[in-house]
Image: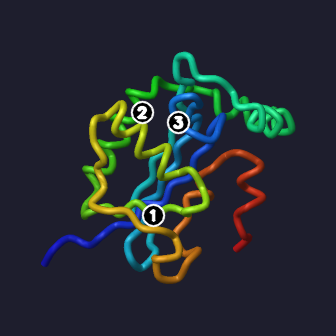
Amino acid sequence: MPPETLYVTTHIHTDGPIPGPHSLLTLASAAHAASGALTSTFTANLRELPGATLHPAALTNWRTRAEDWLTTRRAAKPPALVATAYARWVSQLPGPAVFVSDPDEPDHHFCFWYLHRFAGQWPFARSTTTADVAAPGRFTAETLCALSGCRALVPAG
């Protein structure tokens, strides 16, 4: 019997709309079985990319969330170290991993770019959207986020 497919939801924070000119600041992923049972998690803060800048819209947002900004900077690691560790985490999951993302959010774009740039690979068997996964809302990575702005997004219960 083939191993069960795992659905990996990801929640990120950035300092701008696109990777390269702007940086991925936090990465939180949760691997779920098809039943919704949590299998494994990964979280990390990343250092800013050399030469990247804080986008003006992101600056305005982060200024209203100073404590959240500081949380994203705590124990931040080099992007290559995080991307390599993340790719290894995905590849060591006990089944093929499907990257699940909201098409209206930049999660897939940033993860794809960082994984190819720093780990040299996309470790997922395939990608899908939250709308394509049965019972939307069952899989979430926001609950892993320590930022107060994220905790407000997570439904109670």
Question: What crowding class fits label 2: few (fewer than 14 Cα within 10 Å), some (14-19), or many (20 or more)?
Answer: many
Examine the image and state in which quarter residue 26 appears. top right
Label 3 sits on a secondary structure element that is loop
Q: Which residue is mark 3?
A: 19
**Residue toward you, 46 or 19:** 19
Looking at the image, tell me whether mark 3 or mark 2 is earlier in sequence order: 3
Question: How far separated are the C-alphas under marks 1 and 3?
Answer: 19 Å
Q: Residue at x 60, y 56 (%)?
A: 105
Quote the CA–CA distance across marks 2 and 1: 19 Å
Does residue 76 sit above or below 27 in this rendering? above
Q: Based on the displayed image, in which of its 4 quarters is residue 121 positioned?
A: top left
- The tally of labels here is 3
Q: Is residue 101 above or below residue 54?
A: below
Q: Please, which residue is most extreme toward the top here?
A: 51
Q: Which quarter of the rendering shows the N terminus?
A: bottom left
Q: State the residue lying farthest toward the right.
A: 64
Mark pair 3, 2: CA separation? 15 Å
Q: In the shown orientation, is residue 137 left or right of residue 79? A: right
Q: Earlier in the sequence, mark 1 or mark 3?
A: 3
What secondary structure is marked by label 1?
strand
Residue holding disc 1: 100
**Residue at the (31%, 34%) spot, across then down:** 119
Q: Amino acid at mark 3?
A: Pro
44 with respect to 122 (left or right)? right
**What amino acid is found at the position of numbered circle 1 in the picture?**
Val
Q: Is residue 9 above or below residue 46?
A: below
Residue 137 at x, y percent in the picture = 59, 74
Residue 46 image point, x, y percent: 53, 30
The mark closer to the camera, 1 or 3, is 3
Please identify, in this view, whether the residue under mark 3 or under mark 2 is nearer the observer.
Answer: 3
- Asked if the residue under mark 3 is in contact with the one under mark 1, i.e. CB atoms within 8 Å, the reply is no
The residue identified by callout 2 is 82
